[in-house]
Image: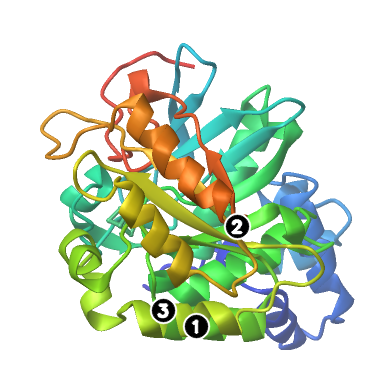
Amino acid sequence: MTERPNIRDLSLEEIESCIATLGKERYRARQILKCLYQGNATSFAEMTTLAREFRDRLEGLFRIAEPRLERCLTAADGTKKLLFALEDGLTVESVLIPGKNHWTACISTQAGCAMGCRFCLTGRGGFKRNLRPSEIVGQMTMLRRHTPEGPNTKNIVMMGMGEPLANYDAVVQAIRLLTSDHGLGHSNRKITVSTCGLAPQIVQLGKEICVNLAISLNAPDDKRRSELMPINRTYPLPELLAACHSYPMPGRRMLTFEYILMAGINDAPADAEQVARLLKGLHCKLNLIPFNEFPGSAFRTPAPEAISAFQQVLLDRNYTAILRASHGRDILAACGQLSGAAAATEKR
Ligand code: SF4
């Protein structure tokens, strides 16, 4: 017997066409989604806005499943790392980062990652599988329900485990569920997709959906970028930057370039000058992230003076270049440190 599909993996249109075969009106699909995402229904029996006979038929067709929140670790700076168990036993992590007035959720889009960036702990563990829409959105629904900070989470960044644009269809569907009025109702202005540089998918995303885009740059030239990030051999900088130029950013929104500063590798003032030339003409800002060392990492955090000098070169050339404080280093929750295997055992 084949397993019933998880209704949380389906789009509005897919549910509409399924229930049409039951002779039900299209608007019932929105009702179902509202029960799931706004009423937090975990069974069809809880969907009391639907007739009992309809609920029973849905029960025969679908199941309802979400990731299970297994563990929550809290760092000294208040950052929280959440470990989720998926139905097949794999685990993924999300991070809740405190801000002045609200929280930012950094969520995963794949179990593991196939991109192999040399500075990234997630990449070292290899690729397990793509997450389904229910597993991407499920990180948000679970943290909204089960952490005190969840309801006050405004920003969502797809910067956790995995390369979002390598799981393109599920990510786009998840964004639709996160932003729609029958879903979680988040503002698309507060959602950021982060990519290591899959140029064709950047172009496609720009045509299909309006969210913020962050590009992990990390080097000022193709030679060094290819050494650090194998994806650059497939989509070198000219191709990547052409895709970035095509990406629509309405109003005053800017593209973000993430730049992990590694001592002696990419942190010289001349490198900053080269980055400034590279990004000329793009409406963008730079996030400078000093490398977060982890056990066995081959790279080192630059000295504070080197970081300041790099930043100053960019500021002098009228770039917005923000030095990002690392959050949650003591629990391996900082950028590039998620492994899906939170080792400590502080229970919720
Ligand atoms: S930096 Fe991102 S794309 Fe690169 S290996 Fe890590 S998770 Fe994957």
Distance, label 1 to label 3, CA atoms, is 5 Å
Dot 1 corresponds to which residue? 243
Dot 3 corresponds to which residue? 240
Task: Tell which circle, 2 or 1, labels the residue nearer the N-terminal end.
Answer: 2
User: Given this view, does label 2 or label 3 mark the residue nearer the observer?
Assistant: 3
**Residue type, mark 1 in image:** Ala
Quadrant assignment, res 330: top left
**Residue type, mark 2 in image:** Thr
Q: Is mark 2 within 8 Å of ligand 1?
A: no
Distance, label 2 to label 1, CA atoms, is 17 Å
Is 139 in front, or is 276?
276
Local crowd size for mark 1, using a 10 Å CA cut-off: few (<14), some (14–19), many (≥20):
many
User: In the rendered view, how is the structure colored?
Assistant: rainbow
Task: Tell which circle, 2 or 3, labels the residue nearer the N-terminal end.
Answer: 2
Dot 2 corresponds to which residue? 192
Task: Assign ligand 1 to one image quadrant.
Answer: bottom left
Total labels: the figure holds 3
Q: Is mark 1 within 8 Å of ligand 1?
A: no
Local crowd size for mark 2, using a 10 Å CA cut-off: few (<14), some (14–19), many (≥20):
many
Q: Is residue 336 above or below residue 53?
A: above
Residue 265 in view of the camera:
yes
At 28% across and 58% down in the image, what residue appears?
Answer: 113
Local crowd size for mark 3, using a 10 Å CA cut-off: few (<14), some (14–19), many (≥20):
many
